[in-house]
Amino acid sequence: MTSPTKKDKQIGDVIIQIRNIHKQFRTPRGVVHALRDVSLDIRTGEVVTVIGPSGSGKSTLLRCINRLETFDRGDIVVDGIPLHGAKNINRIRAEVGMVFQSFNLFPHLTVLENIMLAQRVVRKRANTASKEKAMELLGRVGIPDKADVHPSQLSGGQQQRVAIARALAMDPKIMLFDEPTSALDPEMINEVLDVMMALAFGGMTMVVVSHEMGFARAASDRTIFMDSGMIVEQNTPDNLFDNPQHDRTKLFLSKIL
Amino acid sequence: MGQSTKANVPPPVPELIQEPPTVPDLLLGMARRVPWWAVLLFLLIFWVGIDMLNDQNDRDILDWLADRPEVNTDELYDVVYEVKTEVLLVSETVRVRGLDDTSVTVPIQQVVSQEDGVINCPEDAPEGCLSQRGVVVTYQDFENANRESPNGTVETKGLRTGVVGPLVRVTLADGVQTVVAPNDILSEEEGVLACDAIAVPDCASLSGQIVTFNRPYSLRQGIRVRADARIRHLEDGYEITIRPNRILSRREGTLECSPNATPDCVPTPVTYVVYPEKIIGTELRGDDDKEVQVRTVEQQTVQISRSRIINMEVGTVTCDRSEDPRCQDYEGTIVSVSGETFSGRLSTESASQYDIILEGDAEATEFERRDIQEEIRNPDDCTSTDADGCEITITMNDSTVAGRIIADNDSGVTIETVPEKIVTLRKSDIYSTTARTYKTCALNNPRGCNAGIWLTIIVTLSAFSLALLIGLLMGLFRVSSNPIFYHLSTFYVELVRGVPLLVILLYFAFVVSPQMRDADGIIGDITHPIYDTLTKIEVQVLGNESFLAEAVIGLAVGYGAFLAEVFRAGIQSVSRGQTEAARSLGMSYFQSMRHVILPQAIRTVLPPLGNDFIAMLKDSSLIAILALPELLQQGRLYSTRTFQAIPAYNAVAIFYIVMTLSLSLMVRAVERRSRLP
Ligand SMILES: Nc1ncnc2c1ncn2[C@@H]1O[C@H](COP(=O)(O)OP(=O)(O)OP(=O)(O)O)[C@@H](O)[C@H]1O
Ligand SMILES: [Mg+2]
């Protein structure tokens, strides 16, 4: 019996073009240069993992892709639409799903309502259609029995799976994951990674900030190492992990391994 | 991959064994949830509630509070008794309007039928005749009867008084004169014609040649406009008109001749009816369980100083029947009084009135020019605009005071202009005492405080709703990234929070409102329709123009600043991640506010909002300064009128406690409910 692997899927055209973007945060204590001249192309169906030390700008890069964070220079083109000065950013955001480290489920709504809300409000789907979709996704992430409970009654792993289902409900073309497992207890990490892996093998375009090397090796096509706001090195995960070229990469890998 | 999904299923959690709670557990749980102070205060409320239902309690409580059992609390009540009174039916008439729009009053004896229907214009009707719908009355018309072809005749008796050509002139029992054709006469004999003793009391009967004849009539139709029954009270003899449908029962009887009637008087068949008479007055305390004494008219006295009396003479004092239909004229004293003289400095004058600052007064007093008999100015012909001022002495018109003298001494006389009137009612005759008017607000008459409580509630509710709108908007502005909105709302919040609410209220009533009224026309016709609408609402609620709108807006603006901060804190208490999650799903700013942020913020802000609502309920008492008759103002008025500060302020305080306590318990319950699982 062969389980699916990343080799079964098709890699297509470039869907995200990141061109020389810069990002500075002006804080009372000074200017933080979070991204310096970052350029990156991501193709349809590609799964890119981003690693790097804390404060290296991984989250900022990710958040720039759906413009939760604005950038100062350069441009990002998502699915043919340049983000710089984009008029209808909400339309682009609906095409780009995001999963957060801290889940960010809506605590006042039940699991089902969490997944239905944006479908109804943004996609203007009928109640029945959005409910059907939500139930189907809950089945896919393995918790169809938790539809009517509130998020606070779920375990961390279950919450993150609901968050993934909530993002998938919008039928996004791209999924962004910002350290989806780092707030989880070790025994729950795998249940989330399993869902992500199934998604990756299904052909979803994904950008994943994560230090889960097992996931990176098994599911991702490319791994990027970032440090101090720059892309230092990128390669296939196996090459990057086993045969790093830069000293900073070697130093970093020696710390996390 | 090597990981199988099975390995990730968490081990089954042993199920908690749940036993149903026992009844004592439940009761204990409920008892624990109610705070002790609430129990205490609800006992108080219960006491007030019982008190509201029981008049005797009202009195006992007042006596106890005032510690003066001799205090008579009766003047607090105005009771409307409906008493079953048997009266003599004098006449019953129907007012009928014909097609030609003229109306006639038809005695009920001449009415043949009354039913719903239509009268159509005859074919030869003049132009403009409209068919009419309503209660069609068909009646016998004697006066304009067509003698050649009458619709019918009625056998009638009359006294022969003369002859007109071939016709005989007769006088009927009710005094009406008519002529009779010789062939209509049935018989004629010497006798007595009993006069209509009901219509004309103690009338003399007519004796002479009595003619019995067929009186012809024509049937006519008209639309009923009104029906009246004239009734005479048997004991007091006064007559009033009522609607016939108020008559409860009828009884045929005879009216005996009065002792001083002429000897040929014959008893007359009459109809007695019972109708519910309304007697409005204050109940006097009486221990009798068969009768109740009601003071229907309150005594009024006037004091006149000796120097102003021009003339005093004995005469007939006419009473005001519009006040009391039972009242009768009486012998009393009529006093001519010279007009009083006032002097002071003329402040302003107009075609119809003077404003004069009287000696020793700080403020001007108004005088109507038509009440003034004479004026002397110093310097002569000075006016109010003169720089040196204008001294003026005015003498008011002479007047007369009529009534009974109840005190006469060196300093002057005291005249009872309206004598007190006390009616004794048999309790068995009382038909209903349901309708009561309550004039005064006090603990022993809590229903008298209704107006005040309602106004307090209305003002609080409307001001708080408005404040919620302002607060929500300003709160959203306060977290807005738009610098204009942010600074605008911050300015508003800081400005309004720095000014006492009382000052805000006065400011709206006496600065903003008049200024905006004056701005009408300058900034276009904007303020005018707003003022019109607000005034209409004020008249709806209070019956007159007042500062109600200003009070509501002032309270709302004052509280809006606090609520803005509450909303701001509530919105900021929702973590940034929530907005990011919502926005990352493609929701707009407003969608994420509406569906994600505000529903969560509202749970945080609910308790402070509840507290602010309670605070506003209490602060609504500040509007008493704008003379609005809310709870405190009613209490104050009662206190100054009756000098009974204790019950007045007790009542005010208790009503506020009842309201705020119920509210705070409600807020707790809502808080418990809205908590997230
Ligand atoms: N909103 C902000 N305001 C100011 N500085 C910020 C903000 N967000 C990020 N930064 C700074 O930008 C730099 C990059 O941050 P970023 O969150 O992208 O790092 P990261 O690689 O995701 O780190 P981590 O692994 O800790 O999540 C950091 O130095 C951080 O302090
Ligand atoms: Mg990060």
Image (tube, grey):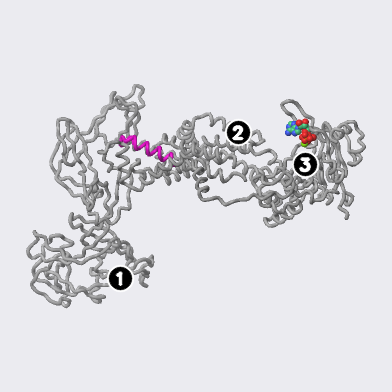
Between residue B508 and residue B638, name the one nearer to us: B638
Q: Position of residue B409 (x, y in %)?
A: 14, 32
Q: Tell me, for residue A186, which label it has, or none.
A: 3
Image quarter for ligand 1 = top right
Residue interval drawn in magenta:
B639-658
Side (left or right) of A107 relative to B444? right
Within-10-Å neighbours for mark 3: few <14, some 14–19, many 20+: few
| Viewer-nearest of discs 3 and 1 | 3
Kind of residue at badge 3: Pro
Q: Tell me, for residue B113, which label it has, or none.
A: 1
The answer as to whether callout 1 falls within 8 Å of ligand 1 is: no
Q: CA distance from mark 2 to mark 3?
A: 50 Å
Q: Tell me, for residue B171, which label it has, or none.
A: none
Pointer 3 indicates a residue of which chain? A
Q: Tag 3's secondary structure?
A: helix
Pointer 1 indicates a residue of which chain? B
The answer as to whether callout 3 falls within 8 Å of ligand 1 is: no
